[in-house]
Amino acid sequence: MAERGENGRKNDPQQTREDILLVATEEFSTHGLAGARVDSIAEKTRTSKRMIYYYFGSKEGLYLAVLEQSYRKIRSLESDLHLSNLEPEEALRTLISTTFDHDEANPDFVRLVSIENIHHAAHMLRSEAIRDLNVSVIETIAGILERGFNKGVFRRRADPIDIHMMISAFCFFRVSNRYTFGTIFRRNLSDGEIIERHRGMIADAVVSYLKS
Amino acid sequence: MAERGENGRKNDPQQTREDILLVATEEFSTHGLAGARVDSIAEKTRTSKRMIYYYFGSKEGLYLAVLEQSYRKIRSLESDLHLSNLEPEEALRTLISTTFDHDEANPDFVRLVSIENIHHAAHMLRSEAIRDLNVSVIETIAGILERGFNKGVFRRRADPIDIHMMISAFCFFRVSNRYTFGTIFRRNLSDGEIIERHRGMIADAVVSYLKS
DNA sequence: CAAAATGTACTAACTAGTTCGTATGTCAAG
DNA sequence: CTTGACATACGAACTAGTTAGTACATTTTG
């Protein structure tokens, strides 16, 4: 296949694309769409600006590709959790922990979503790939709520999308607003002890809400 | 004082400043710091770009002034609620409703905070005015939690900052992530019915958490 | 008059996107 | 298997348009 030449260049389109996307993700997530610099991305890449336009057409095209890739990553993680054989409360707690840990581990993703919201989700609207990832979580939650209610564990009939929002809000906010919140309240939300406490807190809150 | 001249110009520094700030708030909140255009702000103002630099020194200076003004507005609203003569649960529910309605009514503020987080709260750090607005809410919440626990209404001893975060997260997220969330789940979070449901939901969740 | 407030027109620097030319891979024909 | 033609992948340097910020002159106000 393609071996590393001594000095001469080596064609490796796959690698080039991925390299650009990786660098661009970082750039967009730390500077926003308008703040990101194509030249800056190009420099940090092992290829040139020419290639960015060759593969992605425009700065916006690149941004969209970055966004799509980020969403694609979650979708895959989300699927294989096998919660249906767990007790409702246990299943819910597991799902919450997973969401919590995902956001905590992927600040870039969180920041990109924030940025996309500033732009009124205009790019997301144009991407079918992104628009079609509603399914799994909501169905999973709906199933858990249903089982829990039937078993008498949950006394409240709640809307699964609302529950998902409640979970997302907490997990997302901790990461998205880490800096302003941390500054105002002099608290480091990346601190291990606080992470542990918060992970339990959101789970307890949701569960007690459903039980009340 | 200063009257509107027929055609000639009229000096009105106060008004000029405010006019610029108003326009700039809108511009920064919809385009972000880097995306905002000084020329665009100038055009929408009844004065010129020269004045922006005369009063605010630079684009960043203007951005900071916008941010400070936005924070100053909440601080004032927050103070006069007189919650200490209400029953703990009632006081908490009132506080939550207030936060909820504030965020719902001030999407510009929410967006500015999101933007500031993208910039790692770098500007906020440089503004003492903003850094010093931690006090009131936390003390208020601490008082409510204390009274509630002593009365036996709340069974859980919770950290007031954590509780504030939980409330903020929910209220903030509904506004900050309105577009992506709305797009993915085909749900309009500005819908009146949903607003009502969510306002009750976050209150119930926090209260049931504290009671559990 | 002096200081504060304002308008007009300009500039230096930056930045998204392009032009032009070159190297590399591949695949069919010899 | 080797040649050569064609498509794909790539680099360096350039450009046209934009944008933050300024120089200079003028008017208002106390």
Image: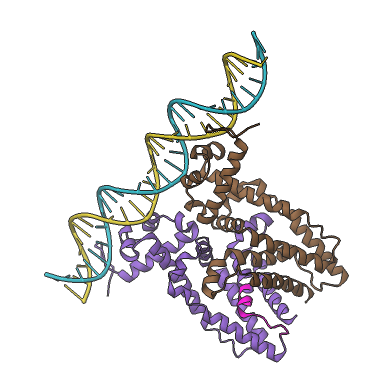
Chain colours: A brown, B purple, C cyan, D yellow
Residue B22 position by quadrant? bottom left
Residue B189 position by quadrant? bottom right
Residue A80 position by quadrant? bottom right
- Residue for point 58% across, 54% down: A121
Q: Find residue A119 and report its horizontal and vertical position in percent.
A: 54, 55
Q: If the image is split into quadrants, where does the N terminus of chain A sit?
A: top right
Q: Considering depth in this image, is B121 or D24 the residue closer to the camera?
A: B121
Q: Find residue B20 and report its horizontal and vertical position in percent.
A: 38, 64
Residue farthest along the front direction in this orientation:
A6
Question: Across the whole image, how many numbered discs are drawn on residues?
Answer: 0
Q: Is residue B32 above or below residue C29?
A: below
- Residue for point 46% across, 73% down: B130
Left or right of B129? Residue A172 is right
Task: Please indicate, yes or no, whether residue B174 appears anywhere in the rendered image.
Answer: no
Q: Considering depth in this image, is C6 or A91 the residue closer to the camera?
A: A91
Q: Considering depth in this image, is A157 or B115 the residue closer to the camera?
A: B115
Q: Is residue B82 above or below residue B50?
A: below
Q: Find out whether residue B42 is within the magenta segment.
A: no
Q: Is residue B24 above or below residue A66?
A: below
Left or right of B62? Residue D28 is left
Give the magenta range: B154-165
- Residue for point 60% across, 58% down: B179
Task: Please indicate, yes or no, whether residue B17 appears anywhere in the rendered image.
Answer: yes
Residue farthest along the right direction in this orientation:
A151
Q: Find residue A21 and report its horizontal and vertical position in percent.
A: 58, 45
Q: Find residue B51 and report its horizontal and vertical position in percent.
A: 31, 62
Left or right of A134? Residue A2 is left
Q: Considering depth in this image, is A102 or B194 the residue closer to the camera?
A: A102
Q: If the image is split into quadrants, where does the C terminus of chain A sit?
A: bottom right
